[in-house]
Image (cartoon, rainbow, N blue to C red):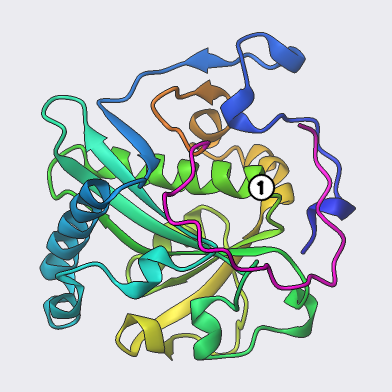
């Protein structure tokens, strides 16, 4: 799944401005901000909301998430933090790992198919949001931040593992099973809980959502959210050389 084999005229969403490229882009403010964790205090907030969310749904596994994981500061990893504008409390988090420096975490469990080898991939994990009413909006905005980050990093495919019933959300976002005949697979880095392994081609997402008349198309594509900032980088900058990639860098407009 490669961006370089596709052509689409949309600019990276974080750089869109109203009227640019004939798109009717509207501006929308959110009651929270999303940014890349850049210091220990931010990471502590992300860990706090992550642990609270997992305690509600998978308490046995959540006991291992009371503190930051070593993976949070690995090369090629960022942690997103959604923070309330009202009181600066954490309302959501997500971790994103690219395969630039090392294989994706899910590859500890299963080898990806040949057609994904050499591609630029990004796996989202450790999604956690507040149980309050704003939680659904936070989830949507974190997914948009994930998509924006993948565009910015020239990622070919977004990859996730999802347990039931969370996987239904990704079905609705038009993610596809990487292993359609396997169903739910015990995944090592999520406590061996059964998850589906799914992906969405970044370069194809725009047209897929447009053709499907997806209800989130305007939110994802035609709305500029200044409160979502994936342009900053984490403080964790280990001097590690990236893995060689066999695929040419993905081509897209800048």
Residue 141: x %, y % from top left: 39, 39
Badge 1: residue crowd in 10 Å (few <14, some 14–19, many ≥20):
some
Give the camera-side residue of 140 and 67.
Answer: 67
Q: Which residues are magenta?
A: 231-254
* Residue 76 occupies quadrant: bottom right
Residue 152: x %, y % from top left: 64, 42
Q: Quadrant of the N terminus?
A: bottom right
Instruction: Say if the magenta span includes residue 230.
Output: no
Element type where label 1 sits in the image? helix
Determine the residue positioned at 47% across, 78% down: 196
Residue 237: x %, y % from top left: 50, 56
The residue identified by callout 1 is: 205
Give the camera-side residue of 174 and 37.
Answer: 37
Determine the residue positioned at 20% across, 72% down: 65
Residue 139: x %, y % from top left: 33, 47
Please state if 157 lies on the left or on the right of 145 as rendered.
right
- Above or below residue 130? Residue 8 is above
Determine the residue positioned at 36% across, 55% down: 94
Q: Quadrant of the C terminus?
A: top right
Give the camera-side residue of 222 and 246.
Answer: 246
* Residue 9 occupies quadrant: top right
Please state if 103 lies on the left or on the right of 204 as rendered.
left
Determine the residue positioned at 52% across, 14% down: 26
- Above or below residue 157? Residue 192 is below
**Magenta segment, prevailing SS (helix, strand or loop):** loop
* Residue 210 occupies quadrant: top right
Please state if 250 lies on the left or on the right of 224 as rendered.
right
Please state if 55 lies on the left or on the right of 234 as rendered.
left
């Amino acid at each position: 799944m490669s961006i370089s084999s596709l052509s689409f005229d949309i600019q990276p969403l974080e750089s869109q401005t109203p009227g640019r490229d004939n798109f009717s882009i509207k501006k929308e403010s959110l009651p929270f901000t999303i940014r890349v964790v850049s210091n220990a205090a931010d990471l502590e907030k992300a860990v706090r909301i992550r642990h609270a969310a997992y305690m509600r749904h998978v308490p046995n596994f959540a006991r291992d998430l009371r503190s930051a994981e070593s993976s949070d500061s690995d090369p090629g990893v960022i942690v997103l933090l959604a923070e309330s504008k009202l009181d600066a409390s954490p309302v959501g988090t997500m971790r994103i790992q690219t395969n630039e420096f090392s294989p994706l975490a899910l590859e500890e469990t299963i080898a990806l198919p040949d057609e994904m080898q050499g591609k630029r991939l990004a796996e989202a994990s450790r999604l956690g949001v507040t149980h309050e009413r704003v939680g659904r909006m936070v989830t949507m905005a974190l997914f948009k931040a994930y998509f924006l980050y993948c565009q910015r990093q020239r990622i070919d495919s977004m990859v996730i593992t999802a347990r039931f019933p969370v996987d239904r959300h990704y079905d609705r976002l038009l993610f596809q099973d990487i292993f359609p005949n396997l169903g739910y697979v015990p995944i090592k880095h999520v406590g061996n809980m059964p998850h589906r392994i799914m992906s969405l081609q970044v370069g194809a997402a725009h047209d897929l959502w447009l053709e499907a008349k997806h209800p989130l198309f305007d939110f994802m594509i035609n709305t500029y959210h200044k409160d979502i900032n994936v342009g900053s980088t984490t403080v964790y900058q280990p001097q590690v050389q990236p893995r060689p990639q066999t695929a040419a860098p993905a081509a897209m407009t800048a």
